Amino acid sequence: MPQIHPKTTPIYQTSVFTFEDLNDLELYFEQPTQQYMYTRYGNPNSDELAEEVNRLEGGAGAVATSSGMSAILTAVLTFCQSGDHLLCAEEIYGGSAALLSQELTRMGIAVTYVPSDSLYTLVDFVQPNTKLLLAETMSNPLLQVVDLKRLAAETKRTGIKLVVDNTFATPIITKPLSLGADMVIHSVTKYLSGHSDVTAGVVVAGTAEDSERSKQIMRTYGLNLSPFESWLAARGLKTLKLRMRQHCANAMAVAEFLEQHPNVKQVWYPGLAQHPQHELANGQGGGMFGGMLSFRLKDDELKTVNAFMQALQHIPFAPSLAGVSTSISHPLRTSHRSLSPEQQQKLGISLGVIRLSVGIEDTEELLQDLGQALDKV
Ligand SMILES: Cc1ncc(COP(=O)(O)O)c(C=O)c1O
């Protein structure tokens, strides 16, 4: 067979690796990072993905996981065991809240939700057995931006770890570890892979010790990412920076357009001067505000939302986000449907709130489609 030097990493679609003899196997156990044995323990494709995200986030080590949910599970289990308590920012992805409230509580890990206005004064929430606080850099769907430096100062002061879900911001906009966070997780399903064709996650640790522990959890619980999904995600990651620039530029243009439209009542986008954390977002994101925004239709009614969705010609309704093509979602009926009416009202999520995941299409095309659909409602 001729010598092969591929420019890109091949897909190591194998569940197991072979050894010459027992001496060779011993070498693996002596230096497991120099060889592979079994894909659940490690695979070149998932390692390539993890190492690249680790580099982007400035971490001490990372591990790829089968989904964003398994990344959150891995992060929690890195720091917590039965009998422990954790804190979670009140505005958090519904799936994360379900994992904490419905599943981890059954394993003896208690959770308390911290309202946004108490996030920087945790003393009343921290108990002797509290191990960590989980927060998102930008919340869904109203894009509240968390001051990570301030939050990290508070978690350090109260002696707990800070775990940040950086899915919405990406390391192109914010690097939480550099601001004092202890661990970062991503739903790689979103911007990092970027093409709406992968379900994956990643955990990036701030210390080698936490990285080792999170890898151990991934292996033992079987939370690994398959070689093909890892390869797809690593491929998507190569264009992350370019994509994010266009996502951000388009989202800014769309936010300004929606703000002026007579059929739109309110727009939430951190890039707009009237957003409550605009200054913070500007500093923390280096002038980039992300590709997600939400808006409330003037007519806050279900039939108007449906009419708007039906009138759109190129933008589909898809309850996910962060792909290269724009999509809309409806928080009340998707991500936030399990909240009580009181919680929905408290957060300000009414029927007419629509979330837009702004893609990387030509800006004019986007504005044209949104404009013609809004004119019809
Ligand atoms: C902010 C955030 N974190 C985590 C997740 C879970 O990720 P996954 O669907 O890849 O498991 C999601 C999913 O939408 C999310 O939006």
Image (spheres, rainbow, N blue to C red):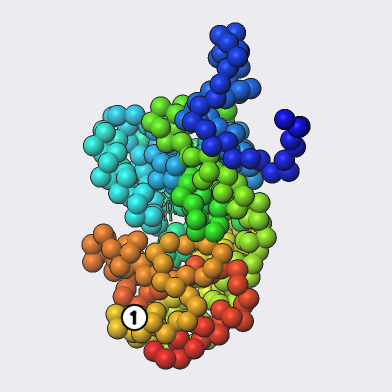
Is 294 or 91 nearer to us in this picture? 294
Which of the 4 quarters of the picture holds residue 377? bottom left
Residue under the image location 23 percent in, 37 percent down: 106
Q: Is residue 270 visible?
A: no
Quadrant housing residue 44? top right
For label 1, the residue is: 306
Of residues 100 and 89, the one nearer the viewer is 100
Residue 216: x and y, percent?
Answer: 46, 26
What's the amino acid at mark 1? Asn
Look at the image and tell me whether residue 359 can be seen.
yes
Q: Is 87 above or below relative to 218?
A: below
x, y percent for residue 178: 62, 43
Q: Tell me the residue at 44%/47% (across/down).
A: 68
Image quadrant where residue 69 sits: top left
Secondary-structure class at tag 1: helix
Give x and y (percent) for residue 47: 58, 35
Count of labels shown? 1
Check the picture and name the quadrant holding the N terminus.
top right
Residue 348: x and y in percent read 34, 70
